[in-house]
Amino acid sequence: MNIKFYNTLSRQKEIFKPIKSGEVSIYTCGPTVYSRSHIGNFRTFLFEDILKRVLLAVGYRVKHVMNITDVDDKTINKANNENKTLAEITSKYTAEFMEDVATLKILPADELPVATDHIQEMISMISALIKKGNAYSTDDGSVFFSIESYKDYGKLAHLNLKGLKQTDRVAADEYTKDHPQDFALWKAWKEEDGDVSWNSPWGKGRPGWHMECSAMSTKYLGNHLDIHCGGVDNIFPHHENEIAQSCAALDSEFVNIWMHSEHLIMTDEKMSKSLGNIKTIPELLADGHSAESLRFALISSHYRSKLAFSNNKLDEAKKSVHRINELYQKLTEIADSGKSLPDEYDLFIEILADDLNTPKALGVLFNYVRDLNRKIDNVQLSKKEAAMGLFFLNKADEILSILKKQDDIPEIIAQLVEKRETARKEKNWQLSDDLREEIKEKGWIVEDLHDGTKCYPL
């Protein structure tokens, strides 16, 4: 099966051809751990999760590296503002990020390198760039990359340097593409950096943000990578600068395919980044949304399209997840054993292999769900068909991960179900009904059967 991905570098879909047969190397830009990641950040992390799951589903071995940026302008400013050490800030938010990754069922990376553990690798790469004439040091002990020394600078963001104002240099990590500048590879220590510094051949200081990713990606995946991912906001300057410094230092192609997810747009006044109340994962869970509903909402639009996010979007996702899970429960009661798949599964995979077209793939899945439900309602579904449907849902869920199985019941729900069982045994029907409603408000249905109680997602 040919897999096609849209390459930001070429601005077109390309047939994916791995560097090593049967293997894929992926580097994804992880969080900058100065605050808790919000739902907009996880739009990108979920796109990368679907990419990885699709590659695994079609038989590739995947080596995935995601960095943790634990030293940059933002983390240092946060530590200063809260009068804490850098490690206190970054360890807290790294732990919270990993909690959210687990909650959303995101497959963890094979390697999660942190920037502060790789300073020597960065110094080595900077030294190589100076030696080759691509970088220069300044009187204060900083080191900058000379964009004039790299003829292909601007090829990812499609910059026309002749038509843009080029200024001398910039020490900040981020800037506009109207002003391409020589960018910092090493930043000389300043008083506001406090005790955040390392010794280098150019003096005491710290690495620039862009250098961190170049050093860590190539250490763990080699000088030539299959795929590099991030959000569209990473294209310039971050990924543009990564390409320049990596290709110049290593004399390599660096990355074959660059993939970027579009922005999540908050369309609900109650959830607006401009108002400062864009939601985190725990906040959305506390609002009654399940991890599965959040996953569904974030993958229901194509990763290269802007995602309009709102409470209505979440309500629709909740209903869709419920339909899938409700059918799954019905099929388990009908199906016999068997592991054959319907033709719809092949179509489902083929669509995902065409640049991760999740909306179209979900359309195939829900058409199939509708057909099965119609047959169930008309008592026309055979045990064999039910088994095929069950196997399809399980296989599709290896990519989507939106099924809530019995062993996935959250601890708080399990405790409420147990408490309700006790109330029923004591014939406290009012408390039993109240607990049923409380469980329902949290997104779960309790069904009393002759042989016990079943609990499944709403």
Image (cartoon, helix red, strand yellow):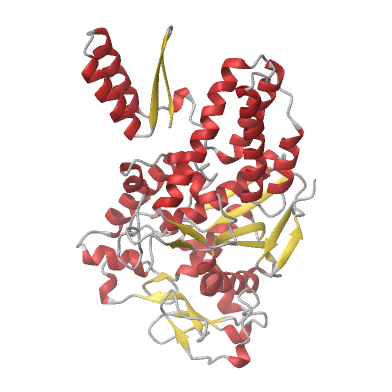
Instruction: Estimate the x, y position of residue 71 in percent, counting from the top left.
Output: 38, 63
For the point 62% across and 31% down, which residue is it?
A: 393
Q: Residue at x 63, y 28 (%)?
A: 374
Q: Quadrant of the C terminus?
A: top left
Q: Is residue 359 above or below residue 120?
A: above
Is residue 412 something one can see in this rendering?
A: no
Residue 436 vs residue 329: left or right?
left
Q: Residue furthest left?
A: 83
Q: Position of residue 28 (x, y in %)?
A: 55, 56
- Quarter of the image for residue 204 reads bottom left
Tally of numbered tags = 0
Q: Residue 365 in the image: state x and y as whole percent.
A: 64, 39
Residue 69 visible in rendering: yes
**Which percent across, then down, holds residue 422?**
26, 12
Name the one closer to the observer, 21 or 437.
Answer: 437
Question: Residue 452: which quarter of the image?
Answer: top left
State the residue in front, 245 or 282: 282
Query: In the shown orientation, is residue 325 left or right of residue 133?
Result: left
Q: Is residue 170 above or below residue 29?
A: below
